[in-house]
Image: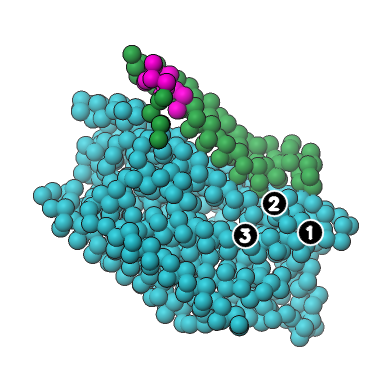
Chain colours: A cyan, B green
Amino acid sequence: MDTTTLIFLFVGTSFLLYTVIAWKSRVSSTKDFYVAGGGVSPLANGLATAADFMSVAAMLSVPGIIATQGYDAAVYLIGPPGGFVLLGMLIAPYLRRFGRFTMIDFIGDRYYSNTARTVAIVCALFVSLTYLAGQMRGVGVVFSRFLEVEINTGVVIGALIVLIYAVLGGMKGITYTQVAQFCVLAFAFLTPIIFMSILLTHNPVPFLGWGGKTADGSMYMLDKLDGLSQEFGFKAFTTQGKPTIELVCIGLTLMFGTASMPHIVVRFFTVPRMQDVRTSVFYTLLFIGIVFLCMPPAAAFSRAYILEAVNHLAYTDVPGWFTTWEKIGLLQFTDLNGDGIIQHVSGPQNELRIDNDIIFLAIPEIARLSNWVVALVAAGTLAAALSTAAGLLLVISTAVSHDLLKKQIWPDLTETRELQIARICAAGAVAIGIYFGMHPPSFIIETIALAFSIAASVFFPVIVLGIFRKRTNREGAIAGMLAGLVFSVSYIVYYQFLGGKANGYWLDITPQGIGAVGMLLNFAVTIGIGALFPPPPAHVREMVEEIRYPM
Amino acid sequence: MPDKAAYWKAHLRLLAGLLVLWFAVGIGLPVLLVDTLNAFRIAGFPLGFWMAFQGAFLLFPLLALLYARRMRYLERKYLQPGDRQGTDTP
């Protein structure tokens, strides 16, 4: 069978599977729709959360960033698992015990204020929409590369699949499809890397293989990669190039951001008890860890191969995958010195531009693996995109139907009506997703950095203080959220969009890492401003006391 | 007799300890001390580089597991004294 047929077969089968699961888990109550009835097992929730978190951006861009930046990119991988540890210890168990439907519910009730609720809704919508844009774009790229359909057609097909299970099954449908999607994406991610590891190091375990000797046994894989990098003028793979403070801030921003992303937090509302939340966080970390362990070796293998095999190659002799990627513009060769030979080096003499996103996608072809691995990778990447998109859609629709309409505008909304509205909002969110996929902002990576910074600097401090410090009051929390938001957004907008120069960064902190500072500012303002106003009313203090204990 | 105050105090102590470990695994060893650790080479990896790209993904799940188990213990000790089964019987 040729590759295209196989891809249609794999992608089609996986889509059919998701649809069947969605049909079997359709729901009829708001509790089922918002939090899957609160009856998901910790293991299933761990798998679903891992799929929810593993976005198409993480699967495509992160191996690419590691390949080009080496050690400096490690913080992008350490951040999210570190965030899950914080989420499991400082946030999720208490919010589960609180027992409502959303993270915004907690902020609104804990700070006895619809102003606080509204600030939280706006930020949650912004975070989720920017993230969604990236996912839908990823769906389009995968479809256009592997199925050779128009990007726009691909976006619509992907969106319709999500629509079916998000509208029918809400959180319940999403949860069980995400479980299936994690299995598909993990299998698809690990298979090519294992083959690549065998090919380059004769060791089938990628995360051991890349520390070992190369296939010809002459030297360590990592030494070879460092040598190759330096030979062509790049920074050595294993050494640090960026200032330490920059790495620390990016790492911390990703950690605090992951711990307070609305679509991640709400996943832990679906397990039965507080103790299940803690177990479930462990499972999540285990499953994410399996994928993350193999990401750096994948990047290293791919990098070593490209540096060695493509450099000094005559342009007329390039392999087939080179031409394929060139055709859709993710690889560009400009023969600067006119000798017809590819020269991939650091600096102005570089003749080859490789888009970060293809480092992982090209592995099956680079390693000359069979067609079915290519098809598997296509299905796996789509699973990553759809699972994250679905989680985000639910947050968007819940923020509107529950947090805005039910809690603020129409408090006497019946459950049936609320459920109907939730479904309509989910469909509306899909439409927005389609729009973003067709007209993606040109700055997806920057806006995703913005999403993490906003989550860290708006949500993390007020949630943690809300649980661990009873004195924290409404006035402090609102001031703190606004301070964090304004500070982070203006820093990012100034440096990313208004032409602020990189050498003007405050203390070397890049816009990607500013969320960590915004978070500290939020903590300080929440406590400082709060001290000027009366403590929260008695019923709020009692609620805080209650959520600290399992019964 | 359940002792909620003692439970919360023990919980905060546990959290403080785990947060120190969390910082060590996430920032301390892989970023702040990376050069020091890179002086050692284990199974082909410079140790600091290994902590950043592999070690953290093995140690973070262990932290989460440790926390979940300790909390189960604290709940049994302070909140259900005398009930040997605890809350987590299936």
Determine if residue A24 is in view: yes
Q: Which residue is mark 1?
A: A201
Query: Residue at image x 68%, y 36%?
Result: B33
What secondary structure is marked by label 2? helix
Identity of the amino acid at label 2? Answer: Phe
The chain letter under disc 3 is A
User: In the depicted view, which residue is nearer to us: A370 or A125?
Assistant: A370
Disc 1 and disc 2 in contact, CB within 8 angstroms: no
Identity of the amino acid at label 3? Answer: Leu
Residue A226 percent location from the top left of the image: 78, 56
The quadrant in which residue A351 appears is bottom right
What secondary structure is marked by label 3? helix
> As displayed, is residue A130 above or below residue A403?
below
The chain letter under disc 1 is A
Disc 3 and disc 1 in contact, CB within 8 angstroms: no
What secondary structure is marked by label 1? helix
Q: Quadrant of the C terminus of chain A?
A: top left
**Labels 1 and 2: the sequence-earlier one:** 1
Identity of the amino acid at label 1? Answer: Thr
Q: Quadrant of the N terminus of chain A?
A: bottom right
Residue A355 percent location from the top left of the image: 61, 69
